[in-house]
Image (spheres, rainbow, N blue to C red):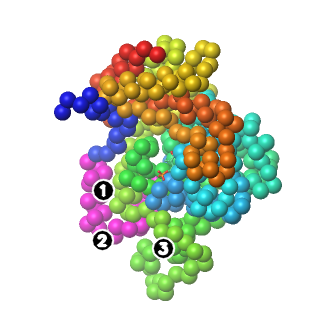
Amino acid sequence: MNNKKVVKVPIARPFIGAEEERAVVEILRSGWVSQGPKCTEFEQEMAAMIGVKYGRAVNSGTNAIHLALLACSIQPGDEVIVPAFTCVAALYPLEYIGAKPVLVDIDLDTFGIDTSKVADAITPRTKTIMLTHLFGMAADIKGTLSVASWRGLKVIEDAALGLGASVGERQVGSFGDTACLSFHPRKMITTGEGGMVLTNSDEISARVAELRNYGASVAAWERHTGKLFDLPSYEHVGYNYKLTDIQASIGLEQLKKLSDILQRRRNIAKHYDDALSDLPWLQLPQTLPGHNHAYQSYVCLVRSDPPNLDMCQAIRNRLWEHLAEQGVASVQGAQAMATISFFHRKYGWEPSRYPEALRADRTSMALPIFPGMTEDEQNHVIQSVRSFQP
Ligand SMILES: *Cc1c(COP(=O)(O)O)cnc(C)c1O
């Protein structure tokens, strides 16, 4: 085992302990393992924490977005404005429906949509703006909400990476008509796989509840415990996107740890800020005034003076190799959607039309950050970055 590339510090590691283990065993012994009372409890706790009326648990963030779009009545041919730099899974649900994603470039201070460019992308077919909060940092919520209300559009927050982030006193996920969370292991809290749709709307909540459960108007748990012997009525074709009570029991324990998780992530980020801020070639994550960063990721940009994209990309790629040799994992933050072959082929998007997204794609680099990261691990990352010759 003398392989130099063995990873010593991973990019992320789930923060799971004895509490989650106990909770799972309890559900396994309870006689009800599918969607049931634990999901309801998880939904209620999450909705209360975010400050919205409803949470509806589903089996992934991707499927949360799918149901949020359907519940907002997005139809084939409708256009949805999405940021040009995000996670590819966020756009797939539009393809499931046959709706069309319309890219808008991002603002590198937040990695979120540049709202000054949204108005130009709106057409008579535009129905919704997807407001994506990347890496634990809220995007320009105020700007997006004002364009949306002026043009009569709905707002769906993709908060898959935004749980725990806030603007002023308000939590990310409470601003849009609806918001979507993910509980994949790379996100703020995890249930293995999982997601949730958040909303204040009775109608959106009810539609998501039906659609995730084969389109049934009554959930299995309610039939199990109630006096309902008839099968429910099915008004729409539905899906099976249910989260299990096994997963929800993990989610509940994870949610109890969220403030601890946030504190740990913020401490690690502060330590990186202090240790790396003198490097002229590295731009560290920004925090806008009034925003509270959750640091789901710690995403830096390689920069040069004067700016030169190809040179910065070459440096970033050499830095990746250098870190890998030191046993430090690092990845690109997210991806420019115009460079994804499926989308490029289907819509003919030119990456250069979204220059900030392209810059983020080619020059971004996420350093390891996770709640259980030790001081030794972080110091090793810092030393590895500092020993690099750009
Ligand atoms: C992870 C992620 C998703 C998809 O969530 P899954 O739970 O992995 O399906 C959507 N949008 C963003 C921004 C993400 O990071």
| Residues tagged 1 and 3 counted as in contact (Cβ below 8 A) | no
Circle 1: residue type: Ala
Around disc 1, counting alpha carbons within 10 Å, would you say few (fewer than 14), some (14 to 19), or many (20 or more)? some
The residue at the point 31 percent across, 63 percent down is 27
Q: Is residue 101 above or below residue 40?
A: above
Around disc 2, counting alpha carbons within 10 Å, would you say few (fewer than 14), some (14 to 19), or many (20 or more)? few
Question: With 27 as the anchor, is 196 left or right in this view?
Answer: right
Residue 272 location (% of width, % of height): 43, 22
Asked if residue 30 can be seen in this view, the reply is yes
The stretch of residues the image draws in magenta is 18-47
Judged from the image, the secondary structure of the residue bearing numbered disc 2 is loop
- Give the quarter of the image for residue 86: top right
| Residue 288 within the magenta-colored segment of the rendering | no
Residue 37 location (% of width, % of height): 41, 65
Asked if residue 170 can be seen in this view, the reply is no
- Answer with mark 1 or mark 2, whichever residue precedes in sequence: 1
According to the image, label 1 marks what residue?
23
Q: Is residue 201 above or below residue 182?
A: below
Question: With 133 as the anchor, is 33 left or right in this view?
Answer: left
| Residue 33 within the magenta-colored segment of the rendering | yes
According to the image, label 2 marks what residue?
31
The residue at the point 37 percent across, 53 percent down is 192
The residue at the point 64 percent across, 38 percent down is 351
